[in-house]
Amino acid sequence: MTKYKKHLAKLAILGTLIFFISCSGEYSRTTGWEYNNPENGGFELTPFLEQMTGPGLILIEGGTYVMGRTQDQVLFDWDNIPRRVTVSSFYMDETEVSNLAYLEYLYWLNRVFGMDYPEVYRKALPDTLVWRDKLAYNEPFVNLYLRHPAYRDYPVVGVDWTQAQNYCVWRTDRVNEMILIDYGILDVDPDQLNENNFNTQAYLSGQYEGLVRSPLEDLNPNGSGERKVKMEDGILLPNYRLPTESEWEYAALGLIGNTMYERILERRIYPWNGNFARTGEEKYYGSFVANFKRGRGDFMGVAGNLNDGYDIPAPVGSYWPNDYGLYNMAGNVSEWVLDVYRPLSYEDFSDFRPFRGNVYKTQVRDFEGYIEEKDSLGRIMWRDVTNEESATRRNYRKADNINYLDGDYASSVSADWLEVPDSSTSSMMYDYGNTSMLNDKARVYKGGSWKDRAYYLSPSSRRFLDEKQAKDFIGFRCVMDRVGSPIPGY
């Protein structure tokens, strides 16, 4: 977090505390009982001014747009048929996650788990061997790209989808821990080891104590007089996560810069206007606005007049940002998104916050309904919702909805309604390894990269890869949900 953002965060904290003091004397409009009064039960009304912006994030104001194809398809896959959807406001990383940011993550894992659970650290390591090419000499990148300080601001690659997800979880915990330290609720604890590490869900469920400095006052007359932070206090931030495919595409297009009232003046092919990849700015006239492969064997141009300036990925803040202020939403590295790939997802998607990949889970609880103890790494344990728990629901009937309308039993042309299987998998429609490369582990990645031609710079292009595989041209960035009003101050 920059000094400027830290200053803003402290001002927000100060404003919240001042507003909290002014809340005394407020009464319920439905019952007439006074809030924040321990003499009548102590129900607390915690003031909330505005969601703080997490470190590295930019607000992406949501809205409606036409998701899907913006130009003719070279491969004629027809997997991105245009359709109008609505995306809620959210926060997104200004840049891709850099090598430096990922090294900070690896250092923390090694410090906390390295002695007793070294496999945790090893599983998080990027696959640096993705740089190898049977007919090219790329060993310098294998040995140096991740760790050499010359590449510290370059986007991390060799990270598979699962590793990217785990990074988002870790980042959530570190940011929320820092918030509690800034509020004076917790003290810095550099001696955290194994299961004794700060985890947001474990803290909220009472499974983590930490070095308490100044707990909040508990107004419940039957309580101990002190309490931890609750979600209702509005202090902790929502989870960092990977963007959905629709969120990534929406943010990349940056149509907010092409909108007058409710009219989009020009539907973009790329994150900038026009159908070419050079800038029209007088000072930089003709310069490339993204890092991509111009043609066969041409990754950066001719010496003395390099076209995009980089033969491999460029530093994460390079080139021009789009109208949301996001860097490298075209070129540099492709990026993982949250969705499971299906060729007809654009036809099946819901109109609001479209996404394919839902597997509903619930916290593991004992027979009395209390949350189970943490696992050996200090995390709350989760399980899939059972069919019995979902039997009376109208909006879903099972936990795993990845294959809904595309890959489940009901969508298969060979379905035998006299023999309905207990489980729903994609194997009937997508015979993985024989007639198809699709299964429930195929994850979408979006955007062009330093290895791609200009066609893939379009945010509407989509490709997929198994969630356990990695490439030297795929990185990622994180997002966070915007809670409350879509626009600050509303």
Image (cartoon, rainbow, N blue to C red):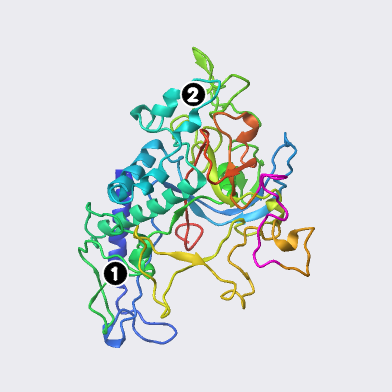
State yes or no: residue 423 in magenta: yes
Res. 409 in view: yes
- The mark found on residue 294 in the picture is none
Residue 175 appears at what percent x and percent y?
35, 53
Q: What residue type is labelled 1?
A: Lys
Residue 102 appears at what percent x and percent y?
39, 41
Contact (CB < 8 A) between labels 2 and 1?
Answer: no
Disc 2 designates what residue?
310
Give the residues in magenta: 421-438
Q: How far apart are marks 2 and 1 (CA)?
A: 50 Å
- The mark found on residue 228 in the picture is 1
Question: Residue drawn at (63%, 41%), measured in percent from left and top?
Answer: 463
Res. 247 in view: no
| Above or below 192: residue 22 | below
Residue 486 appears at what percent x and percent y?
51, 58
- Viewer-proximal residue, 200 or 44? 200
| Above or below 338: residue 364 | below
Q: Which secondary structure, mark 1? A: loop
